Amino acid sequence: MRTPPFNLHFPTTVEEAIDISQKLASEGRSSDWIAGGTDLLPNYKWRLNPKGDVISLSSVAGLGEVSMHRIGAMARLSSLVADASDTLFHTDATISSVHPIIAKAAGKVASILIRNNATLGGNICLDTRCYWFNQSEDWRSSIDWCHKCDCGTGADCRVIPNQNELCVATYQADIAPTLMVLGASIHLAGPQGQRSMLLSEFFQLDGMTRNILQQGELVTHVSLPEDVEQWEGDYLKLSVRESWDFPEVGIAAAWKKNSAGELIDLRVASTALESIPKLHSEAVAKVLQQGWQGQTSILEVAELVRQSIKPVKNTYLAPAYRRKMAKVLTKRVLSQLE
């Protein structure tokens, strides 16, 4: 399949990128940002909402920083992986310079070739997926389209029939839940200036809007708290194939202990189960209020996570199985706290 034609723009600063986006919008021309292109270009080849103009961030200075407390939006995922053999871009300065949970999640994304092009910002802003949507143009036209890519027909959602107001396509990226459990903030720049918020507040529960980015706004970097190195944790995922595939379930957890080795704080987040990654703050708080009791508390947290998620039938694995595996993976991630 050929990529449809589009005009490609190469700004060299964040300000220039925003100006180009604003100029195109004023002319009635829609545009997309492109970072590594590992998600956008395959979607374009399938004619999934392609735009006539694409603004590349590859030449924008200052977006590739990688450190324990700050990661640029254009940082390649391979530069976040602790194993130097994973990447063409590693230097001694970048090996293991990010939190181990982030490094582990980055190493689970797709394949080495993909990670050498994919970026942090692109993974966070990954388009939601659904097997009624991620198909060829001929396949989608044969079923009279779907709500997310209706080609102006006003088609209903194929997952939840008889409505075209809410898209329930699933968010299937790996990095976001690890950043959320570490308390990361995301930083944006746009026509109205700069703003930031906790990453858990960045996403919107809709498979089409996905997040709070406004027209002409882009992600510049994420930052992590000063005490991030005091947190331990893990990330586990379930996918159809070990490599390449998007997660069908992903669970991240981070915990903090005092000098006596006692648990004083815990966070759990999930991905690939709804239209957004989810931080399970209420479930964890409920259990922590009762006092941590090892295996008993782990089982309680895992069950509460299972109860709080609502997957739908739009990925390869059945929703009931994904809910069960969310509980299983939560228990496995927290097994170090028994």
Image (tube, helix red, strand yellow):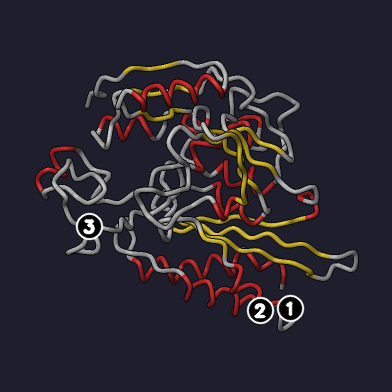
Quadrant occupied by the C terminus = bottom right
Q: Looking at the image, is mark 2 or mark 1 earlier in the sequence?
A: 2
Residue 150 falls in image quadrant: top left
Q: Is residue 150 rendered to the left or right of residue 211?
A: left
Q: Is residue 316 rendered to the left or right of residue 294?
A: left
Question: Which amino acid, by three-letter code, is at mark 2?
Answer: Val
Q: Looking at the image, is mark 1 or mark 3 earlier in the sequence?
A: 3
- Residue at left offset 30%, top offset 29%: 51
Mark 2 vs mark 3: give the one in front.
Answer: 3
Look at the numbered discs 2 and 1 and tell me whether their residues touch, using CB distance below 8 Å. yes
Look at the numbered discs 2 and 3 and tell me whether their residues touch, using CB distance below 8 Å. no
Q: Is residue 196 visible?
A: yes
Q: Is residue 266 above or below residue 203?
A: below
Q: Which mark is residue 287?
A: 2
Task: Tell me where residue 266 appears, x and y as whole percent.
Answer: 70, 66
Q: Is residue 181 above or below residue 85?
A: below
Q: Is residue 255 above or below residue 54?
A: below
Task: Tell me where residue 301 appears, x and y as whole percent.
Answer: 60, 75
- Residue at left offset 48%, top offset 22%: 19
Q: Which residue is mark 3?
A: 164
The residues bearing labels 2 and 1 have C-alpha atoms spaced at a distance of: 7 Å
The residues bearing labels 1 and 3 have C-alpha atoms spaced at a distance of: 44 Å
Look at the numbered discs 1 and 3 and tell me whether their residues touch, using CB distance below 8 Å. no
Q: Is residue 77 visible?
A: no
Q: Which residue is mark 1?
A: 292
Question: Which amino acid, by three-letter code, is at mark 3?
Answer: Asn
Task: Tell me where residue 293 appears, x and y as whole percent.
Answer: 73, 81
Q: Looking at the image, is mark 2 or mark 3 earlier in the sequence?
A: 3
Which element type, helix, strand or loop, lies under badge 1?
A: loop
